[in-house]
Image (cartoon, helix red, strand yellow):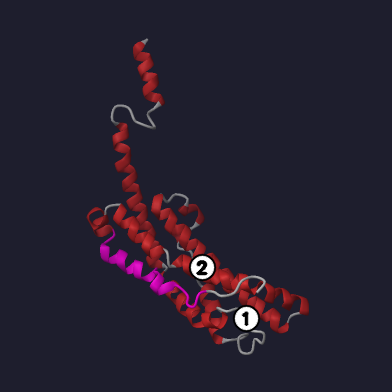
Amino acid sequence: MRTATLLLLCSGIALLAGCGGSGAQSRPAALKLEREDLVAASRALKSATTPVVADVAATKSAWPLIANGLPADLGGLSGSEQVARATRAAAQLRLPPQFGEAQARTLTGRASQLAGLFRSYMLLSGRGWKLLDAGLAQIESGTPASAHFARENSPLYIESIYDGHFTLAQIGKKLLAAYDKLGGAAAFGTALTRGEVDALARTYSEASDRLHPHVAVRIGS
């Protein structure tokens, strides 16, 4: 009876504390998986570098034209080459396969957070530019009602662009923190070097990606 009771207790708490030493093995296995996922996330970020850099450069060129909201007279803003270039660059952003919906669900820990940040950036920036470009066309040549609607909602599109790049700028420091937390260069070895992480952190940083000046328009303004 005593033996049966012990067996029942052991099986009941195995997931929490382990029985016969199995719990002692779970943490190293989880740590290994987290490191593998961080390597995969880093490879995804590296593969996206070229279109991201192009999007950031195009957005920074156009940003001063819209940061304070749309002017009463659009003048050269509608059809502006800076706006057109930024809209095209944002539309060319692609989600790395590792960050796709199905694959991202399998990522663990900090890698999952990095995937979420990148998806948010791509969605906010891409939709913001697409809607703003469409809104400018409506203001210029649409019906009075559609032009009014587009102008009233343009602050949402502008804020979306700003928020997207703010989100992008958080990725680098999250990656650095994750790399150090999971053991740094000694743990990752050649699978993910300190130099690779530092290069990614510079690309996905506030210094590289934040938009200036700060967005200065709100809905209803």
Q: Badge 1, how many Cα within 10 Å: few under 14, some, many 20+?
A: some
Image coords of residue 100 (percent x, y): 49, 58
Q: Mark 1 points at which residue?
A: 70
Quadrant position of the N terminus in the picture: top left
Which residue occupies 65% across, 86% down? 74
Q: Is residue 119 above or below residue 64?
A: above
Element under label 2?
Answer: helix
Which residue occupies 26% across, 56% down? 184
Image coords of residue 99 (percent x, y): 46, 58
Type of the residue with mark 1? Leu
Q: Which of 172 and 50 is in front in this view?
A: 172
Q: In this view, does 24 lie to the left or right of 12?
A: left
Q: In which quarter of the image is residue 73?
A: bottom right
Which residue occupies 77% across, 79% down? 144
Image coords of residue 31 (percent x, y): 32, 46
Which residue occupies 52% across, 71% down? 162
Element under label 1?
Answer: loop
Q: Mark 2 points at which residue?
A: 164
Which residues fall within the magenta stretch?
Answer: 192-214
Secondary structure mostly seen in magenta is helix
